[in-house]
Image (cartoon, rainbow, N blue to C red):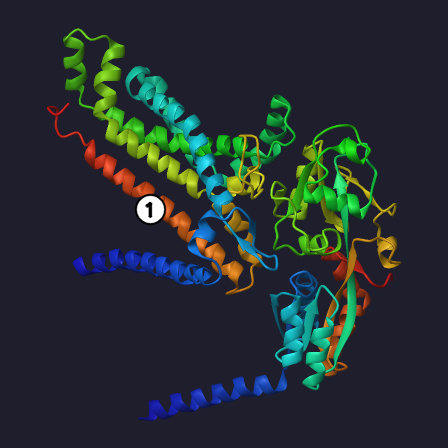
């Protein structure tokens, strides 16, 4: 019985480590063709030219910008919705709204990407009178759609699980409802909220379909939020199928995978660290 | 003990069956260009359905690899989306191999714009400057003023390869060009974007987008076949010497009415009108 479960646990660990080993084995050989500095900070991505350029700075910046902007949209929306649902809304409202928000999370990303490409792109283009609607802003908006349910759902659990005694004590001391929310409930659930934000954003960093369809795919360093960008996952998805096996281009795409892996790994470390640091132990440590 | 002998006998018999089937069935190895791949794939499937004793194994890897496979003898048919280069011919001849080209299909790439755009005609030089990012406004090519939104294909696509070779003359497309993963994606993006310019295979033209004349020539099957449309190329299958046996049958199949219909189905232009 015990060894059976151990085996199951080991299986996933072994599978995961094998994937990581494979990723590094296939990605590292690109360093024979370009230096690490040229790869990470090169400004031109022309992988099929002769001679080829393998600079992924535009792709990295594309990923970072898209994630930051989607965070700016999704964090306030998600966290505030969570606080409203957990503390302010009447029970009937939150019983209806919460499942709907969670249902958003189950929306396939290809549907959101398609929506961004076909509906939102022409809309943005006319609204802001810009040349093209497939751009950084569009992709960020679509990614925010995907991050909101994650952020909202996990934060709501955190906010909801703040002990009632804390809230009652604060109200009893004469604090208003708003003061109680801002000074007591939010700090008490901060670790859960931070974890929620980071998990939501790490989903946005790794999301492929949406950025492939809605971001425009130009490997340029963006100068405005209405410029098209080509985030890391979009490059891998678009080019891997045609890259000759074990060619420089193939290794470069795996190396992009390593960079992406490092990104999400850092995000998860951060989430772990924050949830540990701001952990609320009992009711006395506020 | 009896069981052991039985199982060994079965194993030997099994091995014999596998070995003999390999001896008797014709095996055809096809390698090369990813542009020719869809045609070869469709043709291989229907050909194998009609000739169950022939086994075709198919792989991509690019035109260069296709021709190399012919020279090395690792494939019977090498696909290429370009003609053989002089260097490759000399290499083949030194190895005693005489590659024979068969032009099985043609490929035309047509520049397209949004139907609201007033521009109808561009030269290849203007197209190149637009994709280099030198011409940025439609007014510079005789249209109504407005920023040109350059839309291109991913650098690994075969369509991009033609564009790169015949329009860009191997110069680089401007980094700010949007890239789209498919012909259909270009149609979608150009139809939604008033200032856009893109390029698609001839088979993808429709009412949502407007085809542009290149050097005054409209891209059609006819202008491609007579060679007047500039952005077109032949798709080739190379064989090692004049083909024989299954290789000949397969090449003949591609040139048959059925095979040429598959060529059209794969989005290329048949070399024969039946």
Name which residue lies at 42% across and 27% down: A72
Say left or right for B120 vs A52.
Answer: right
In the rendered image, the vertical position of residue B13 relative to residue B234, given as above or below = below
Residue at far left of view: A284
Residue A110, image x, y percentages: 52, 41
Name which residue lies at 52% across and 48% down: A235
- Mark 1 surroundings: few (<14), some (14-19) or many (≥20) residues within 10 A: few
Please, what secondary structure does the residue beneath circle 1 have?
Answer: helix
Q: Nearer the viewer, residue A83 or B140?
A: B140
Please tell me in which quadrant of the rendered image residue A133 appears. Answer: top right
In the rendered image, the vertical position of residue A52 relative to residue B68, given as above or below = above
Say left or right for A188 vs A223.
Answer: left
State which quarter of the image contains the C terminus of chain A.
top left
Q: Chain of mark 1?
A: A
Residue B61, image x, y percentages: 60, 66
Please tell me in which quadrant of the rendered image residue B269 appears. Answer: bottom right
In the rendered image, the vertical position of residue B56 relative to residue A53, given as above or below = below
Residue A214, image x, y percentages: 56, 37
Say left or right for B79 vs A204.
Answer: right
Residue at far top of view: A174
Q: Is residue B205 visible?
A: no
Q: How many marks?
A: 1
Name which residue lies at 25% across and 55% down: A9
- Residue under label 1: A265
Name which residue lies at 82% across and 45% down: B123
Q: Is residue A96 visible?
A: yes
Residue A275, image x, y percentages: 23, 35
Please tell me in which quadrant of the rendered image residue B117 appears. Answer: top right
State which quarter of the image contains the N terminus of chain A.
bottom left
């Amino acid at each position: 019985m015990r060894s059976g479960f151990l085996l199951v646990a080991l299986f996933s660990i072994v599978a995961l480590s094998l994937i990581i080993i494979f990723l590094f084995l296939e990605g590292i050989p690109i360093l024979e063709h370009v230096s690490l500095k040229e790869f990470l900070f090169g400004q031109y991505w022309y992988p099929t030219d002769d001679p080829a350029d393998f600079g992924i700075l535009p792709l990295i910046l594309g990923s970072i910008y898209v994630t930051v902007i989607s965070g700016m949209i999704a964090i306030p929306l998600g966290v505030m919705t969570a606080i409203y649902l957990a503390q302010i809304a009447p029970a009937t409202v939150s019983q209806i709204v919460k499942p709907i928000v969670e249902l958003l999370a189950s929306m396939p990303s290809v549907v959101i990407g398609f929506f961004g490409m076909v509906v939102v792109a022409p809309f943005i283009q006319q609204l802001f009178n810009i040349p093209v609607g497939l751009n950084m802003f569009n992709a960020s908006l679509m990614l925010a759609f995907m991050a909101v349910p994650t952020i909202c759902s996990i934060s709501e659990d955190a906010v909801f699980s703040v002990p009632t005694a804390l809230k009652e004590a604060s109200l009893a001391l004469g604090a208003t409802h708003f003061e109680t929310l801002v000074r007591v409930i939010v700090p008490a659930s901060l670790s859960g909220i931070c974890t929620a934000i980071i998990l939501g954003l790490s989903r946005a960093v790794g999301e492929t379909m949406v950025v492939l369809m809605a971001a425009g795919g130009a490997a340029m360093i963006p100068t405005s939020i209405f410029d098209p960008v080509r985030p890391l996952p979009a490059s891998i998805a678009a080019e891997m199928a045609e890259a000759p096996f074990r060619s420089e281009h193939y290794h470069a795409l795996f190396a992009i995978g390593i960079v992406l892996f490092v990104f999400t790994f850092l995000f998860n470390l951060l989430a772990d660290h924050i949830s540990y640091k701001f952990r609320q132990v009992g009711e006395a440590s506020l | 003990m009896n069981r052991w002998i039985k199982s060994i006998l079965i194993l030997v018999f099994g091995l014999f069956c596998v070995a003999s089937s390999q001896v008797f069935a014709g095996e055809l190895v096809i390698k090369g260009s990813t542009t020719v791949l869809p045609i070869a794939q469709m043709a291989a499937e229907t050909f194998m359905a009609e000739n169950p004793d022939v086994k075709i194994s198919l792989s991509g890897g690019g035109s260069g690899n296709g021709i190399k496979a012919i020279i090395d003898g690792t494939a019977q048919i090498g696909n290429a989306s370009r003609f053989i280069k002089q260097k490759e011919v000399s290499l083949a001849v030194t190895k005693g191999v005489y590659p024979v080209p068969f032009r099985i299909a043609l490929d035309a790439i047509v520049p397209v714009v949004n139907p609201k755009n007033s521009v109808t005609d561009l030269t290849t030089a203007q197209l190149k400057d637009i994709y280099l990012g030198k011409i940025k406004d439609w007014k510079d090519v005789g249209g109504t003023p407005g920023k040109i939104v350059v839309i291109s294909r991913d650098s690994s696509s075969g369509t991009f390869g033609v564009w790169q070779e015949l329009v860009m003359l191997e110069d680089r497309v401007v980094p700010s060009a949007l890239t789209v993963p498919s012909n259909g994606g270009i149609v979608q993006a150009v139809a939604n974007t008033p200032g856009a310019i893109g390029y698609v295979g001839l088979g993808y033209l429709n009412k949502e987008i407007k085809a542009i004349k290149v050097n005054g020539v409209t891209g059609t099957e006819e202008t491609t076949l007579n060679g007047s449309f500039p952005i077109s190329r032949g798709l080739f299958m190379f064989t090692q010497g004049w083909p024989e046996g299954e290789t000949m049958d397969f090449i003949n199949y591609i040139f048959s009415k059925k095979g040429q219909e598959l060529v059209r189905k794969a989005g290329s232009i048949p070399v024969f009108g039946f």
